[in-house]
Image: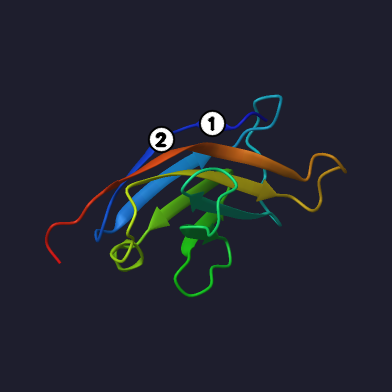
């Protein structure tokens, strides 16, 4: 599966309903996400530290939620998560892990692209 190239614009301080990514296998059939997990990060540039934001199917405090349902992976950001962000642009990617897949096919990138923060005026 090739990653989808999608740029994101997130309105700082507002609940961003996010994006839903339908996942299909190499034959075009819906991919069963049962037993899978996913994670993703925003960074200023690829490989820079620290991560500006993290998504997960099991998020810690301050992290964004990734939900998996059927063959749909969804990311979102709450206003309470973005209100303190102090950056304008970054890069992100989302990775899916399927521990039941054959070796060499367990981790793959779902999406990546630029992230633009539409800065909040009213606080």
Q: Is the residue 104 above or below the residue 2 in the image?
A: below
Number of numbered discs overlaid on the protein picture: 2
Can you name the residue that lies furthest to the right here? 103
Residue 40 x, y percent position in the rendering: 56, 52
Determine which residue is flagged by label 2: 7
Quadrant including the N terminus? top right
Residue 115 falls left or right of residue 38: left
Can you name the residue that lies furthest to the top here? 27
Q: Residue at x 28, y 59 (%)?
A: 15
Residue 45 falls left or right of residue 120: right
Q: Label for residue 4?
A: 1
Q: Label for residue 41?
A: none
Mark 1, mark 2: which one is toward the viewer? 2
Q: Secondary structure at mark 2?
A: loop
Q: Is the residue 62 above or below the residue 65 in the image?
A: below
Residue 4 falls left or right of residue 76: right
Residue 106 x, y percent position in the rendering: 78, 45
Residue 101 x, y percent position in the rendering: 81, 45
Can you name the residue that lies furthest to the left here? 122
Can you name the residue that lies furthest to the front here? 48
Q: State the residue in front, 2 or 28.
A: 2
Residue 17 falls left or right of residue 112: left
Sort mark 1 into few (<14), some (14-19) or many (20+) by Cα contacts within 10 Å: some
Q: Residue at x 49, y 50 (%)?
A: 43
Residue 52 x, y percent position in the rendering: 46, 58
Q: Secondary structure at mark 1?
A: strand
Q: Residue at x 19, y 56 (%)?
A: 120
Q: Residue at x 56, y 60 (%)?
A: 56
Quadrant including the C terminus? bottom left
Sort mark 2 into few (<14), some (14-19) or many (20+) by Cα contacts within 10 Å: few
Distance of mark 1 from mark 2, alpha carbons?
Answer: 10 Å
**Given contact means CB atoms under 8 Å apart, are the residues at marks 1 and 2 in contact?**
no
């Amino acid at each position: 599966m090739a990653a989808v190239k999608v740029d994101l614009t997130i309105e700082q301080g507002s609940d961003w309903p996010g994006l839903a990514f339908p996942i299909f296998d190499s034959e075009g059939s819906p991919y069963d996400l049962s037993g899978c997990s996913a994670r993703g990060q925003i960074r200023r540039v690829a490989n820079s530290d620290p991560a500006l934001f993290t998504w997960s199917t099991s998020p810690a405090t301050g992290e964004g939620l990734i939900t998996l349902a059927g063959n749909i992976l969804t990311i979102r950001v709450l206003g309470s998560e973005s209100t303190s962000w102090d950056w304008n642009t970054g890069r992100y990617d989302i990775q899916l892990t399927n521990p039941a897949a054959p070796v060499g096919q367990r981790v793959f990138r779902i999406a990546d692209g630029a992230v633009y923060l539409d800065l909040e005026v009213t606080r």
